[in-house]
Image (cartoon, rainbow, N blue to C red):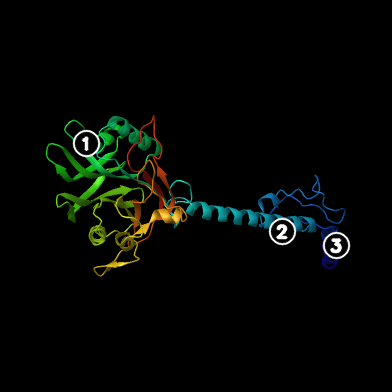
């Protein structure tokens, strides 16, 4: 009896095993043991991603979820394509983030790759020099002449202005002071010579910016042993740093050595300031370009063992134009100059120069000189 029962139990066990094995081998079951959602049966038809096929509930190709693997070849190809696209997008985003992060003012070597303040872009500085003509030499239309100059300044807005023959008479206001009041510019005036009770004449500098420093030096060889000459300087803080600007009105004497002596003294005064950034020197120098004084300033001649290093702006922009500035009604010589005074760090580059106030206004010329206006790029 026991043997019979054991036999029946063995038969029953074999039947159960046969049933279980037949069920397990009946089809391609792609489901994962840990999940109860079946994936499509690839034995029947291609994966068209329709309901009942690969429902992608766990293998979410749109999110590129690598946790669940889709056995379908097309889905694998799509996964690869999506992976590549995702990688490209992420690479682009990374590149954009890297570029944008460092193209603002905080992290880029240029300080700013926007248009507002790129350190690689030079600062534009405009310089004017003009001999105002002492009213003692032309007492007519002084107010009209002053107004012409003020109107020009207000229109063109130069950063620095060098005035010569900026004089005051008993009944005529100091013209540098008057022009500063009319334009809103800051100014400094230095008397050079005078005739008591008749006039006081000097040189002046005007600028739109506050003046941080100013100084002057007397030059040798007074005209007629009476009329002194001087060089005047200012320092102004511009957008990219300090800029020095100098002005002078040299002797009218014909002695070329005396003129060269004054040019040397001007150059030494500029050198003594220790310019780091390029500065500018301008004025009525009463000397034509081929004289010893001007050749010395340009570094083309020695004087007393020294050689200048100033850069004459006009010939750079007008190599074939002599640039005559005097007399204004029929110019025949160039005696008004704008120079770059190089610093230890960099040199300014002249962009353009022009003669200004060349025509009468309502029949009135602003002066017996023509003005010179130059624009510079200063690193």
User: What residue is drawn where x is 35% and y is 33%?
Assistant: 148
CA–CA distance between discs 3 and 2?
42 Å
In the rendered structure, find residue 174 and report the number of the disc placed on it: 1
Placement of the C terminus among the 4 image quadrants: bottom left
35 lies left or right of 189: right
Q: How many C-alpha atoms fall within 10 Å of the one at disc 3: few (<14), some, or many (≥20)?
A: few
Q: Is residue 311 visible?
A: yes
In the rendered structure, find residue 18 and report the number of the disc placed on it: 3
| Image position of 274 with respect to 210: above or below | below
Task: Give the residue number, with chain letter if any, for mark 2.
Answer: 80
Q: Are marks 2 and 1 in contact (CB under 8 Å)?
A: no
Q: How many C-alpha atoms fall within 10 Å of the one at disc 2: few (<14), some, or many (≥20)?
A: some
CA–CA distance between discs 2 and 1?
84 Å
Q: Is residue 120 visible?
A: no
Q: Position of residue 206 (x, y in %)?
A: 28, 42
- Which mark lies nearer to you, 2 or 1? 1
CA–CA distance between discs 1 and 3?
123 Å
Taking depth in this image into account, of 147 and 102 the one nearest to the observer is 147
Taking depth in this image into account, of 152 and 364 the one nearest to the observer is 364
Among the two numbered marks 1 and 3 on one chain, the one whose residue lies closer to the N terminus: 3
| Image position of 36 with respect to 181: above or below | below
Taking depth in this image into account, of 286 and 128 the one nearest to the observer is 286
Q: Position of residue 124 (x, y in %)?
A: 41, 48
- Which mark lies nearer to you, 3 or 2? 2
Q: How many C-alpha atoms fall within 10 Å of the one at disc 1: few (<14), some, or many (≥20)?
A: some
């Amino acid at each position: 009896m026991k043997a019979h029962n054991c036999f029946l139990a063995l038969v029953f066990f074999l039947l159960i095993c046969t049933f279980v094995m037949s069920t397990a081998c009946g089809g391609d079951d792609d489901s994962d043991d840990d999940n109860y959602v079946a994936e499509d049966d690839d034995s029947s038809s291609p994966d068209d991603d329709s309901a009942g096929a690969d429902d992608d509930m766990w293998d979410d190709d749109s999110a590129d979820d690598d946790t669940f693997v889709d056995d379908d070849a097309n889905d694998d190809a799509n996964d690869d394509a999506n992976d590549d696209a995702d990688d490209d997008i992420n690479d682009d985003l990374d590149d954009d983030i890297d570029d944008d992060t460092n193209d603002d003012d905080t992290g880029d070597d240029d300080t700013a790759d926007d248009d507002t303040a790129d350190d690689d872009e030079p600062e534009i500085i405009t310089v004017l020099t003009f001999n105002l003509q002492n009213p003692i030499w032309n007492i007519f239309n002084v107010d009209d002449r002053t107004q012409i100059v003020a109107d020009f300044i207000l229109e063109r807005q130069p950063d620095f202005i060098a005035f010569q023959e900026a004089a005051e008479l008993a009944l005529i206001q100091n013209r540098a002071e008057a022009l500063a009041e009319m334009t809103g510019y800051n100014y400094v005036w230095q008397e050079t010579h005078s005739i008591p009770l008749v006039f006081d004449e000097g040189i002046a500098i005007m600028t739109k910016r506050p003046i941080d420093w100013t100084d002057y030096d007397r030059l040798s060889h007074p005209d007629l042993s009476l009329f002194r000459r001087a060089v005047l300087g200012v320092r102004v803080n511009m957008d990219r740093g300090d800029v020095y600007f100098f002005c002078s009105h040299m002797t009218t004497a014909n002695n070329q050595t005396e003129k060269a002596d004054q040019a040397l003294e001007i150059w030494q005064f500029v050198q003594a300031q220790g310019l780091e950034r390029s500065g500018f020197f301008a004025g009525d120098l009463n000397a034509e370009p081929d004289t010893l004084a001007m050749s010395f300033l340009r570094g083309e001649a020695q004087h007393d063992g020294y050689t200048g290093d100033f850069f004459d702006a006009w010939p750079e922009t007008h190599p074939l134009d002599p640039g005559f500035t005097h007399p204004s009604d029929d110019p025949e010589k160039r005696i008004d100059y704008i120079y770059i005074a190089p610093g230890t760090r960099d040199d300014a580059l002249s962009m353009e120069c022009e003669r200004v106030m060349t025509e009468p206004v309502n029949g009135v010329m602003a002066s017996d000189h023509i003005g010179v206006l130059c624009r510079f790029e200063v690193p």
